[in-house]
Amino acid sequence: MPLAANDPVADLARTPSVRSALEWFRKERNWINEQHLKVCRVAAPTFLEEKRAAYLEERFRELGWDAATDRAGNVVASLPGRALPGEGQVAITAHMDTVLAPRVPEDISI
């Protein structure tokens, strides 16, 4: 579907930086799906998300990010040296818990 004219979201999608990011996601789709499976295969039933939080924190650190798990069990990560006072920030949030935990990791598949 073509992007509409005079639509702020469409205008944003046309910018070179966003187009580049969208292209990266398209090219890396298989890798992204593999990472998603790995995260989902770490059991995280409600109120018992510690293993998944530790897994995510370690993955962020492997990517060179500053990462920590706060007292509430949230994983907070940021690129070192990228957050400057007065600049806007982008937050990506998601629930870590799952309703049904897999019996074995292979229970989770595409």
Image (spheres, rainbow, N blue to C red):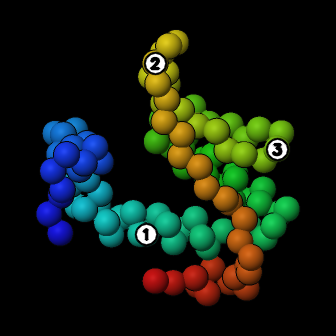
Q: CA distance from mark 3 to mark 1?
A: 28 Å
Q: Is 42 above or below relative to 107?
A: above
Secondary structure under the numbered disc 3 in the rendered image:
loop
Q: Are marks 1 and 2 in contact (CB under 8 Å)?
A: no
Q: Residue at x 74, y 76 (%)?
A: 99
Q: Quadrant of residue 34?
A: bottom left
Three-letter amino acid code at the position of disc 2: Glu
Q: Nearer the viewer, mark 1 or mark 2?
A: 2
Q: Quadrant of residue 30?
A: bottom left
Indicate which disc, 3 or 1, sits on the residue closer to the N terminus: 1
Q: CA distance from mark 1 to mark 2?
A: 33 Å
> Label 2: which residue?
87
> Would you say 59 lies left or right of 23 here?
right
Quadrant location, the N terminus: bottom left
Residue 29, given in percent of the width and then of the height, sits at 31, 66
Tell me which residue sits at (39%, 63%) in the image: 32
Q: Nearer the viewer, residue 16 or 36?
A: 16
Query: Outermost residue toward the top?
Result: 85
Dot 3 or dot 2, earlier in sequence: 3
